[in-house]
Amino acid sequence: MILINLISLFLLYYLKKSAGPQGFPTHLNRYFKYGMIAAATLIVLGILHVPPAILFQLASFALVGAIIYFILHTPELEYQRTLAITPLPIVGVQLLDYLVRTLSPGFHDVIENYFDAAGVFALIWAVTMWLNHRKQMKEVEIERIISKEQERQLRSTAEQKSQLEILVAERTSEILSQKEELQHALDHLRSTQEQLIQQEKLASLGQLTAGIAHEIKNPLNFVNNFSELSVDFLDEISEEMPRIPDSPEKENILDLLENVKSNLVKIRHHGSRADGIVRSMLMHSRGGTGTMEPSDLNALIREYANLAFHGMRANPNPINVDIQLDLDETLPKIKLNSEDFSRVILNLLKNAFDAMRDKIEAQGSEYKAKVIIRTKDLGNRVLVEVEDNGPGVPDEIKDKLLMPFFTTKKGTEGTGLGLSITHDIIKSHEGSLEIQSEADTFTLFKILLPKTIS
Amino acid sequence: MKILVVDDERDVEDLFRQKFRKEIRNQGLELLFAFSGKEALEILESDDSPPVVSVFSDINMPGMSGLEMLGIIKTRFPQLTVNMISAYGDKDNYRKAMSSGAKGFFTKPVDFDSLRKEISEILAS
């Protein structure tokens, strides 16, 4: 009977060991444990010959039967089926031997040799089955390893794929951002090209105007001088007039002379206007005068802001303006043609005053005119800003602002050259001029000057 | 007292004669006119007329420029005062004129008040 229980113990032990890395469910492990305890108990009882022997013997067969049944009917152990039939002949022979011995001991003695032979055959069968089972188990194991390997490869492929996808997405976004940068650069290039064309046009126009100015200047001087002289002569004539006796003719002559004089005054007035335009036009071509010297830009701004303000106050139609200076005191001296650059400040402030005067006339005293001048050190460049809270510059005229002779000022007030000259001067300092504006809110002139000029 | 005015514009003669009418009438001012540098030098070199005391000359003239003429006058007639007249803000010409020995420099359009002052000084001397 001990053999049966050893078989039970072996089966359970083997099953327990055969668990893969994932293990069996806990209830199966529990069954294995209890089965092994039962088998071991039965072995101990068998050795000790504890009665009643019959119960112990039946229990042994029941246990091994239960284990075989358990193997065949548990889904988790399906692959161990061949194991279940391995001990069957041994158990069968033992059971038959036991039954015959119990029921008819005499007959048993007669056929005992047959039982022995059957026992040997059953053992050979069991060993064969056992080896076969081992082989099967190994194949199953290899298959399992192969499938695991495949699964691993599949997983790593999926991982690589997702990594590649991330990489592709990264590259795509990089390319997109590069494309955007390029587009931006292209736009910038285009606008620069347009500006260059515009500047080229302005430059040729500037040369032309300077040429015209030179040609007009001399005849204009004669117009002005002779008209002035004639006014003087008329004054002398009127001094002499009282010595001539009164007569209707004299009255008529005096009347006509008065008209001639007023006409001459008009000629002189408009002549001096034209002279002003010619002077401004010549400013365009006036190259090489004044020198680039390290200058205190803040001091220049203070001086000319003051001058512009008092100049405006002294002229007809003065306005109240709050001028604020927000100057970067850390500004180093920069190379400037002070004489020229002072015109930039004067021109920009004059424009601001004129624009704000229009707004005051339109809106009345509710509106408080204000100009802010800022300077800022930007490392290798210096920023100068002139901002007013005037009526702003409409978009449609923004790009015409720097053209010579373009003016928004009424009648005879503007020559249309102020900003054009301003722009020229800034260009001669290798700087740039930018205009920002919002209707009825502000106009901002931004000047960027390099600290060092080549 | 003779003053020579050099300018290629012929109307300058009328202008000066009218502007200095009083001086010509009352103070013995005599104006001579030349319409080129060459003509001016000819006038200065002709012996049969009383000497010119001062010259007022334009710079931009066809042929000999005012500055060239200034150089020649200063070597041949060092005692002669020469005043130059040129276009607005013409700093280069100003420097050249002053370094070549010009007495004064007037910008166009001529400010006749300062010119009159200059001439009065010459007349008074």
Image (cartoon, coloured by chain):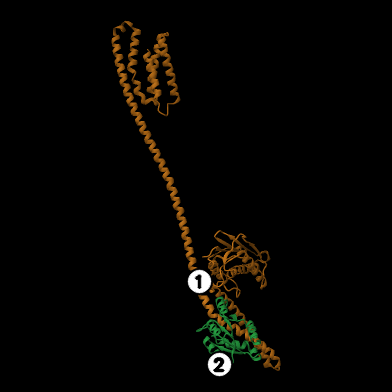
Q: Secondary structure at mark 1?
A: helix
Whole-percent x, y for residue A398 in the image: 55, 66
Q: Nearer the viewer, residue A380 or A228?
A: A380
Look at the numbered discs 1 and 2 and tell me whether their residues touch, using CB distance below 8 Å: no
Q: How many numbered markers are drawn?
A: 2
* Chain painted in orange in the figure: A
Same chain check for tags 1 and 2: no
As drawn, B36 above or below A14:
below
Q: Hey, which quadrant is residue A338 in on the image?
A: bottom right
Q: Hey, which quadrant is residue B79 in on the image?
A: bottom right
Q: Is residue A246 visible?
A: no
Q: Is residue A121 visible?
A: yes
- Chain B, chosen colour in render: green
Q: Nearer the viewer, residue A287 or B72?
A: B72
Whole-percent x, y for residue A98 in the image: 35, 10
Q: Which mark is residue B47?
A: 2
Give the Cα separation between the discs numbered 1 and 2. 52 Å
Q: For mark 1, what is the residue?
A: A203
Whole-percent x, y for residue A370 in the image: 65, 64
For badge 1, the amino acid type reads Ala
